[in-house]
Image (cartoon, rainbow, N blue to C red):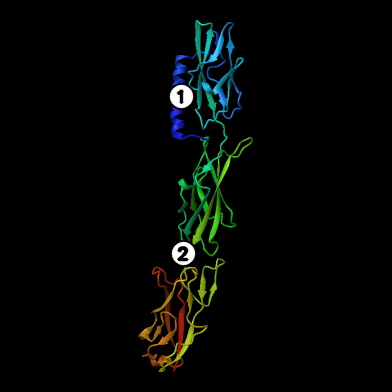
C-alpha cells in the first residue's frame, strides 16, 4: 500500500526540513537526566513490531517519556530503557525520517527535552511494475529497419524503491528473436532490427523483462514481465510472377519465369487467342493475402501493333497480318520480340522486376 508521490515528497521534505532545524538547534545526544548513543539512529524498513531503535540512559531520580507533541510519537513506545517501534515502517508508504522527542523529568520542577531523528533505510523489497503487462502491436511487413515498434513510454516499468531498472528482451517463437531488439539495457523501446518477411512468419510473441538489479553474487533481483504480441500484416512488397517459374532462393522470394513461345504463319491472321508454350500467359500476385488483380499490357517490341493482349485474361491475339518490308529475310523464319508487363491495378508503384521475353517465329 502506498501514497501518491506528490504527497510523499511533500511530507518527506517537511520532515527533512524539521529534522535539519532540530539538528542545528539540538545537536547533542544527551540532556541532563537522560541520554542516547545517537540522536540520529537508522532503522531498516519492514521492521518487526518491538524493534529497538535505541537504548536510553536515565539518571537516578529521573523519568523518561515520549513527548505527546512529537510529530511521529505514535510510532514509538518506551519499554524499560528501550525506545521501540510499535509497528513496521514502510519507506515507500511513510516518511523517510521519523521525529520523536523524549522528555526527561525530575519531580515536577525539572524537565528536559531530547529530540531524536530516526532515519528509515530503504530496502529493495518491491518488484518493478509495468503499466500494462500485455500489449499487442500490428505492424506492416514493409516496416523500415530501425523503426520503433513499441514506444519507450508504453513499456517503461516503475519501481517504488526508486532502483535503476534493467531490461531484457526475449522471443517465445523460434527463429524470430533476431528481428526485434531494445534500444539499451535501460531503455526498453522496441525497434525492428531486421527486415520482415511475411512468408517466414506473420506473428510472434516477445517477453520484456524489467529487473531492479543486475546479476551478481548474493544480489536480490525482483523481476516483472510484459508480454508483447506482434502481428505482421502482409504488405505489397513483390511484383507479380509469370507462371510457370522457378525459385532461385531458399526464401522462395524470387521466381524466374520461363519464356513463352508461339508460331504464326505469314500472311495469315488468327482470330482466336494464340497458342503458347509452355502455356498461356498467366501471372499471380505472390503477396497472396492481398491477391490484387493482375492487369496485362504490351509495353515493347510490338512493331506495327500486330499483337494485343487482353488486360484481364492475358490472352494474346492478332490485330492484323504479320508482314515485313524485308521479305528476303523471311525465307525460312522471322522472329519478332516483344515484352509483356504486369501491373497491380491498385498499386501503381509496382511493375515486374523480371519481364519475360515472348519469342514468336513467323513462317511463310
* Residue at (57, 31) in percent of width and height: 123
The residues tagged by marks 2 and 1 sit, at their Cα atoms, a distance apart of 59 Å
What secondary structure is found at the residue carrying circle 1?
helix
**Residue positioned most to the front:** 108
Q: Residues within 10 Å of mark 2 (few under 14, many from 20)?
A: some
> The C terminus is located in which quarter?
bottom left
Asked whether the residues under the numbered discs 2 and 1 touch, taking CB atoms below 8 Å apart as contact, a structural biologist would say no
Image coordinates for residue 296, horizontal then vertical, percent: 42, 78
- The residue carrying mark 1 is 16
Which of the 4 image quarters holds residue 346? bottom left
* Residue at (38, 88) in percent of width and height: 319
Image coordinates for residue 62, horizontal then vertical, percent: 56, 8
- The residue carrying mark 2 is 235
Residue 355, relative to residue 22: is it above or below? Answer: below
Residue 243, relative to residue 65: is it above or below? Answer: below
Q: Residue 331 carries which label?
A: none
What secondary structure is found at the residue carrying circle 2?
loop
Amino acid at each position: 500500500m502506498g501514497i501518491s508521490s506528490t504527497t510523499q515528497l511533500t511530507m518527506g521534505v517537511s520532515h527533512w526540513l524539521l529534522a535539519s532545524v532540530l539538528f542545528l538547534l539540538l545537536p547533542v545526544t544527551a540532556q541532563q537526566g537522560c541520554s542516547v548513543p545517537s540522536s540520529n539512529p537508522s532503522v531498516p524498513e519492514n521492521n518487526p513490531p518491538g524493534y529497538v531503535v535505541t537504548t536510553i540512559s536515565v539518571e537516578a531520580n529521573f523519568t523518561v517519556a515520549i513527548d505527546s507533541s512529537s510529530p511521529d510519537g505514535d510510532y514509538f513506545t518506551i519499554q524499560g530503557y528501550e525506545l521501540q517501534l510499535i509497528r513496521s515502517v514502510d519507506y515507500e508508504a511513510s516518511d523517510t525520517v521519523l521525529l520523536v522527542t523524549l522528555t526527561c523529568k525530575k519531580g515536577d520542577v525539572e524537565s528536559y527535552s531530547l529530540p531524536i531523528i530516526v532515519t528509515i533505510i530503504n530496502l529493495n523489497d518491491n518488484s518493478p511494475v509495468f503499466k500494462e503487462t500485455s500489449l499487442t502491436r500490428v505492424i506492416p511487413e514493409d516496416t523500415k529497419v530501425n523503426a520503433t515498434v513499441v514506444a519507450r513510454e508504453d513499456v517503461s516499468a516503475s519501481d517504488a524503491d526508486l532502483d535503476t531498472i534493467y531490461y531484457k528482451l526475449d522471443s517465445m517463437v523460434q527463429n524470430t528473436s533476431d528481428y526485434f531488439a531494445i534500444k539499451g539495457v535501460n531503455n526498453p523501446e522496441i525497434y525492428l532490427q531486421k527486415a520482415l518477411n511475411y512468408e517466414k512468419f506473420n506473428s510472434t510473441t516477445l517477453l520484456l523483462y524489467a529487473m531492479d538489479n543486475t546479476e551478481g553474487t548474493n544480489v536480490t533481483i525482483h523481476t516483472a514481465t510484459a508480454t508483447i504480441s506482434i502481428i505482421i500484416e502482409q504488405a505489397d512488397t513483390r511484383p507479380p510472377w509469370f507462371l510457370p517459374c522457378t525459385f532461385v532462393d531458399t526464401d522462395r522470394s524470387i521466381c524466374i519465369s520461363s519464356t513463352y513461345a508461339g508460331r504464326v504463319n505469314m500472311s495469315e491472321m488468327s482470330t482466336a487467342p494464340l497458342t503458347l508454350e509452355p502455356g498461356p500467359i498467366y501471372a499471380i500476385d505472390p503477396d497472396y493475402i492481398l491477391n490484387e488483380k493482375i492487369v496485362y499490357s504490351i509495353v515493347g517490341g510490338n512493331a506495327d501493333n500486330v499483337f494485343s493482349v487482353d488486360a484481364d485474361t492475358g490472352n494474346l491475339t492478332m490485330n492484323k497480318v504479320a508482314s515485313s518490308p524485308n521479305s528476303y529475310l523471311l525465307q525460312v523464319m522471322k522472329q519478332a520480340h516483344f515484352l509483356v508487363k504486369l501491373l497491380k491495378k491498385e498499386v501503381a508503384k509496382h511493375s515486374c522486376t523480371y519481364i519475360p521475353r515472348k519469342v514468336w517465329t513467323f513462317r511463310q
